[in-house]
Image (cartoon, rainbow, N blue to C red):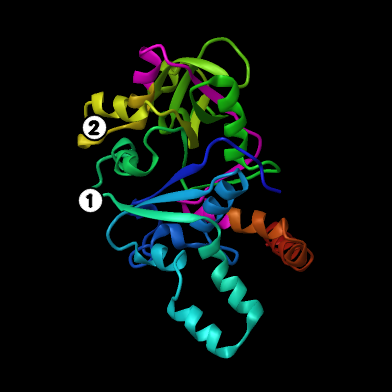
């Protein structure tokens, strides 16, 4: 099902090194690692398109040519399948290319999330846009990005997807400081990876945003932080300080951190179980493995 939206463009960040998934990512972009039979980044694009997005801007680093080939036309595989005359297989191969319009920009150095967003400025400036981290695979009835698009309408400014995190997890997340309750709820601040005792809430930021048009002006004003990196959290906090509405939205869905081996593995099982043609064949294997682990 496709959801209509006033947000027409999405930026998908794919410039990371993928060090948590080595050695698999030594030569293969982490965004191209498969979940069942599709690469991670295709799930991100499909979520965007199902949320009303028409144009996707990929922010890439050197060595990510596999992504441009996957979403491009006239690949070596496409040429081979066309020669075979297999129409069904050719449709599968061409499907990623036909999902949306694509633009590609290069982040020339690892300088933080805000710097990566700024690399896409020429394609999205002057209008709100979605920002998607493909590492966060979110399974939900309504696409997470579509949920944020709806929240943007009521918030009137940037919207950040959040979920409840445990005290042990707090130091690994950006944490929002909400004004009262509600969903979406307006923010009075954000803190990047605080100690649990200093956290203003237990709502951690995950990799989905709708960013208002002023975000680039705030990125320009944001000084570099640790390791010389420019943090998006700081730019969003600057929007808040300027009196602009910035809201958190507790999305509905299940998120998998596929940038880690366990998260990628569990995501694959979850996605497979959501597919009827795989579910019935997979369940007996899972039961057998579970019984084996219990009995030893």
* Above or below: residue 134 compared with residue 92: above
Q: Where is residue 192 in the image (x, y as percent from the top left)?
A: 37, 26
Label 2, residues with CA under 10 Å away: few <14, some 14-19, many ≥20? few
Label 1, residues with CA under 10 Å away: few <14, some 14-19, many ≥20? few
Residue range highlighted in magenta: 237-265
Cβ–Cβ under 8 Å for marks 1 and 2: no
Instruction: Say which mark, if any, is on residue 108.
Output: 1
* Above or below: residue 203 compared with residue 125: above
Residue that numbered label 2 is attached to: 226
Please name the residue shown 38% across and 19% down the image.
239
Tell me if residue 194 can be seen. no
Residue 257 is covered by the magenta coloring: yes
Q: Which sits earlier in the primary sequence, circle 1 or circle 2?
A: 1
Instruction: Say which mark, if any, is on residue 166.
Output: none
* Above or below: residue 246 compared with residue 57: above
To which quarter of the image does residue 145 belong? top right
Residue 293 is covered by the magenta coloring: no
Q: Position of residue 84 (x, y in %)?
A: 57, 89
Give me the C-alpha separation between circle 1 and circle 2. Answer: 19 Å
């Amino acid at each position: 099902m496709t959801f209509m939206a006033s947000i027409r463009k999405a930026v998908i960040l794919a410039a990371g090194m993928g060090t948590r998934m080595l050695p698999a990512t030594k030569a293969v972009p982490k965004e191209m690692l498969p979940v069942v039979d599709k690469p991670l980044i295709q799930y991100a694009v499909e979520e965007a398109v199902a949320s009303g997005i028409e144009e996707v801007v990929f922010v890439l680093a050197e060595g990510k040519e596999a992504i441009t080939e996957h979403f491009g036309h006239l690949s070596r595989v496409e040429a081979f399948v066309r020669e075979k005359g297999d129409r069904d297989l050719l449709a599968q191969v061409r499907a990623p290319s036909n999902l949306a319009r694509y633009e590609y920009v290069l982040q020339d150095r690892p300088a933080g999330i805000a710097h990566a967003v700024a690399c896409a400025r020429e394609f999205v400036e002057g209008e709100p846009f979605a920002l998607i981290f493909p590492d966060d695979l979110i399974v939900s009835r309504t696409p997470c990005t579509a949920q944020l698009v709806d929240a943007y309408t009521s918030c009137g400014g940037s919207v950040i997807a959040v979920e409840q995190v445990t005290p042990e997890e707090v130091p690994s997340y950006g944490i929002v400081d909400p004004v009262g309750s509600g969903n979406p709820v307006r923010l009075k601040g954000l803190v990047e990876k605080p100690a649990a005792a200093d956290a203003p809430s237990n709502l951690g930021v995950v990799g989905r945003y709708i960013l208002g048009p002023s975000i680039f002006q705030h990125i320009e004003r944001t000084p570099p932080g640790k390791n010389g990196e420019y943090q998006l959290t700081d730019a969003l906090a600057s929007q808040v300080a300027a009196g602009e509405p910035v809201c958190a939205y507790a999305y509905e869905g299940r998120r998998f951190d596929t940038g880690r081996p366990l998260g990628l593995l569990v995501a694959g099982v979850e996605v497979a179980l959501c597919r009827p043609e795989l579910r019935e064949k997979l369940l007996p294997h899972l039961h057998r493995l579970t019984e084996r682990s219990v009995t030893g």
